[in-house]
Amino acid sequence: MEPAEDAPVARRSARGRAWRIAALAGLAGLAGAASLARVQRIDARTQWLQARADATPGPRARDRYVGSQRCRACHPTAWQSWHHSFHRTMTQRADADVVLAHDATLPDGSRVQRTDVGASWIDGQGTLRPIVMTTGAHHMQIYWTAQDDGVLQAVPWAWLVDDARFVPNEATLLRPHDDGVVYTWNRVCIRCHAVAGAPGWDERTAEVDTRTAELGIACEACHGPGRRHAETHATPWGRARARADEGGDPSIVHPAKLSASASSEICGQCHGITVAHDEAAWLRRGSTHAPPDPLADTAALVRHPARADQPWLDDVLADDADFLVDRYWSDGMVRVTGRELGALVDSPCAKGGELSCLSCHSLHEGTRADQLAPGMDGDGACTQCHDAERWATRDHTHHDPGSAGARCLDCHMPRTSWGLLGAVRSHEVSSPDVATSRAVGRPDACSLCHLDRSLDWTAQWLQRWYGRPRPDGIAPDDPPAAVQWLLAGDAGQRAIAAWHMAWPPALAASGADWQAALLLELFADPYPAVRLVAHRSARAIAGDRVPALADGVLPDADLAARLRPWRTAASPVTDYAIRAMLAARDDRRIALAE
């Protein structure tokens, strides 16, 4: 009887064992599937990382450069200050902690997708490409993907750091709308966004083999190739010999120990308007130029014909008729940022003097945003040479000491250059002059602060205070100069005026209750950058009355029409005058080569 009684238990146990076996088999299958999926994910990740590594410009072989990491052990303080700078982040490998953008699906159906190791761009057709490198980390960040031929091409969307959103890449540069514009890092950006860049661009074979000594603007960009220096200081006797050299250590460049012109040329290799002597050769193999080689050995510093006679410039203009208008005001003053050497050499303070870039800037001690040396972010930049008791006084400035009108830089280096979606200080020292504003179109310092005043008003005060003659052709009932530039100027003037409409010193001098309404008129501007800056300024003034924009979206006429009802009667110009100025807008092509 016992066996019979135990039979159901045995059967249940058998069924339980079978169930457990099946469950274990199922779990094993699931584990196998999970393991396979994990392997596949690891494999995909490895392939992705390898594709990015293959597309990143390789190092220059058997060269004079050693890279910034070799500098760190002996120069930790200098290395750290450079590492904190925006020069270093000018170009970086697109690691996860480098990419600033969030995940986004953009209006053209493409996507930027972040991962734990970086980011990818998926175009509107679903093709995925790793983002190889980034350019910028201060105002904006551009993303580069590799094409099948090795060319690094920009994703069509740029990340604005302060706005925390994407905009069309073309909206970041002040040039006409062009859906087909393509940006290539190998051919253009490499000139200044890497150390010793060699494009490896051979148009005869259509092959691209780009190499650099280091991405970003690193130690050897300013101090010259470091291999000899590192080898010299690798031994005690080498270090002793370098210290004993009366002329300083010859194995490395110390820009501060060079002459004013030589040290400025180190900055000018990027911060200057130059033309390579042999462009085709440079594209193939890169340049052998390195500090402290004279800039003229490999390139010519371009100066406007109004400032210097350079007969060879005719050949440049034959290839690019707009070369000058894309870079200079008509009197020869530089109008784009990032090209300050040409402005510096034409400044009265530099002619026959010791003014150099290092007079005001310091890479290792300066502010992160502008690399301004201590004390150089105000009048101290000028009073280090000019007697403060004579010039930094109300008798000279005729403004309250605490106001922008009393600041040397705001009067003598106004923001009449353009770049990175903002007005930037001119680096050619000058004085406000209404006659020049009329003849050239470059805004004068007074009108960029007193936005509600005419050129006639400015001319009267300049005549009373400084004896400047009042030019013909201006009248007391003319519209405010800044409003004329905003509505009727060329695209560059419109952008500069739009930026200043939200400049705090200008709002303090002109009131802040009317500018936003005029900025609405630029929401339909044909230049994407002008529309973007106008929206930024209007939102800075009017707050939430001007809505924030989504990723990839720019202001347009429809948005302006929706917002127009809150325009007030406080505007210094009538609706009729607004319509007249818009009708007279200067529609000449502007493509500023910042």
Image: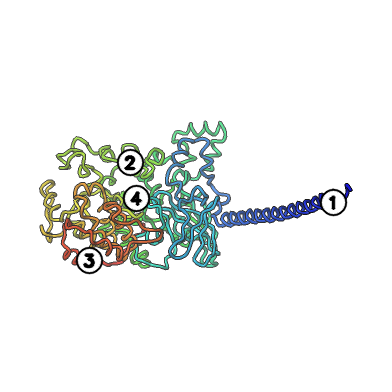
**Which of the marked residues, 1 or 2, is nearer the chain's N terminus?**
1
Name the disc covering residue 273, or none: none
As displayed, is residue 488 above or below residue 447? below
Q: Which residue is mark 3?
A: 582
CA distance for labels 1 and 3: 100 Å
Q: Which residue is mark 2?
A: 359
CA distance for labels 2 and 3: 43 Å
Q: Secondary structure at mark 2?
A: helix
Name the residue nearer the viewer: 205 or 315: 205
Name the residue nearer the viewer: 433 or 460: 460
Q: Secondary structure at mark 3?
A: helix
Mark 1 residue type:
Ala
Q: Position of residue 582 (x, y in %)?
A: 22, 66
**Which of the marked residues, 2 or 3, is nearer the chain's N terminus?**
2
Mark 2 residue type:
Ser
Q: Residues within 10 Å of mark 2 (few under 14, many from 20)?
A: some
Name the residue nearer the viewer: 449 or 283: 449
Q: Residues within 10 Å of mark 3 (few under 14, many from 20)?
A: some
Q: Secondary structure at mark 4?
A: helix
Q: Residues within 10 Å of mark 4 (few under 14, many from 20)?
A: many
Name the disc covering residue 341, or none: 4
CA distance for labels 2 and 4: 13 Å
